[in-house]
Amino acid sequence: MLPSGDASGTRLRWAQACAGLAMWCLGALTLSIPKGLLPFGVLLLLTTALVPVRVAAGARRLGMPAAAVAAAVALAVGVPLVSSWMLGLEPGEVESLDRLLVLPWTMAWAYVLAPSSEWLWRGSLCGLAVAAVLAVLQVADGAGRASGWGNAIVFADVVLLLTVLAVFCRPPGRWRWAVCGLVLGTLAILLSGTRGTWPGLLMLLAVLVLGSGWRSRRSRLLLLGATVAGVAALVTAVPGMSERARLQELQRDIERIDHGDHDSSAGARLERLRVAGRAFLEHPWTGVGFAHFDRAMERLPECRRTPAPERCHLGHAHNDLAEWAATMGLPGALALLALYGVPLALFVRLWWRAPRPPNPRGVALAGAVFVAAFASCGLTQSMFAHQTTTSFYAAVTGLLLGMAMREAATRAQHRQA
């Protein structure tokens, strides 16, 4: 048992009640209001202050999984500082990475207070409903892309992650609500015009359909194909939707790339990947400096002109692996892989050992798909260059790990009893 000398039963009950509210706020408010992560952060701090010794003891009881997660976070925060120090550069936006320290904290917090994942599921559904309404209102008001309260890409990325939680954290028998969340999330993503979320959305659908126990595997493949075809038909049939989804723009970008013109959205991304590759090969151990990707871009002749094209000053590589490898060398690439790989391996291990329901759901599966979806978004966007996506990844990954570990511990106790 965890020690209780630092907290009365009353304080523990208050902490557990507020933990459920914090989970709901994380899902419901992240996109619904400006600075939407703040309520969760305040409640996390308050509940930890109520039972600090219990949370610290929970971290010790978690053992090697907690140590592995903490090591991955320490690597992700430490490598940028060392890289900047070795090159004599300012560390730049390291404050966006120090938010990763929340990951082992929320892991221990969720393990000790054991909040129900249903709070996170309910909050995610509320958050998706608000995001869809915001997207429709902004587009109806004449906005080219729905962006919530900030960046359109960040908005779509968080919508995708909320959709993962709404689908896989659902309680038994709530699949209709999960489908509703999936529809709301897809609508908001399409109206945002963010194409980088499509691979993650397809992966979500694949896990949902292929992992279900519905008839034969052939029937599931046909259902998945019909679902994807239905979404494609909707996009092409609804007037203006293909423009909103930027399908025509993508076709024009490809044509411009074929003619050697990289001054477009897709062209700039391909150009930055090439620049990142050269920077990594030239500086394999230190990179060009954390948060200083523009130093690599300045080597392009067109980026030395005055004025330089806008794409020369975007600040990052629009790809997490390329960004970390180019700016921090091989240590940076390994740190990123650990930041994804350690939680993903733990989730897969917990999911494999747990009793699996006929339909794909559960905290461990939600965590695995969440990390994989986040990584897929990182193929076209530097996810850890933004405080919102960094904080959301750290908070949700830690929560899901802590809850999954608590479920595993409870099952082990029942087997021994």
Image: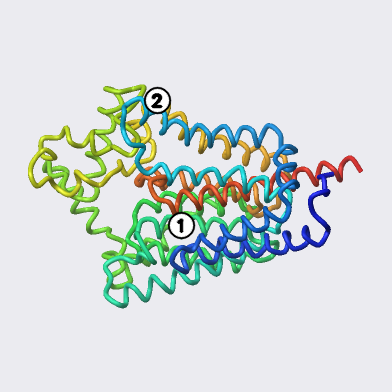
Name the residue at 34% across, 60% down.
152
Residue 40 visible in the snapshot: yes
Residue that carries the numbered disc 1 in the rendered image: 158
Residue 226 visible in the snapshot: no
Name the residue at 72% across, 59% down.
15
CA neighbours of label 2 inside 10 A, class few (<14), some (14 to 19), many (20+) = some
Q: Amino acid at mark 2?
A: Leu
- Image location (x, y in percent) of residue 129: 50, 71
**Rounded to the nearest whole Å, what is the CA distance between mark 1 and mark 2?**
28 Å
Q: Amino acid at mark 1?
A: Val
Query: Residue 271 sits in which quadrant?
Result: top left
Q: Earlier in the sequence, mark 1 or mark 2?
A: 1
- Image location (x, y in percent) of residue 375: 45, 43
Question: Foreground residue, 217 or 410?
Answer: 410
**Mark 2 secondary-structure assignment:** helix
Q: With respect to residue 187, does 324 lie above or below?
A: above
Q: 144 left or right of 414?
A: left
Residue 330: mark in rendering:
2
Query: Residue 43 sits in which quadrant?
Result: bottom right
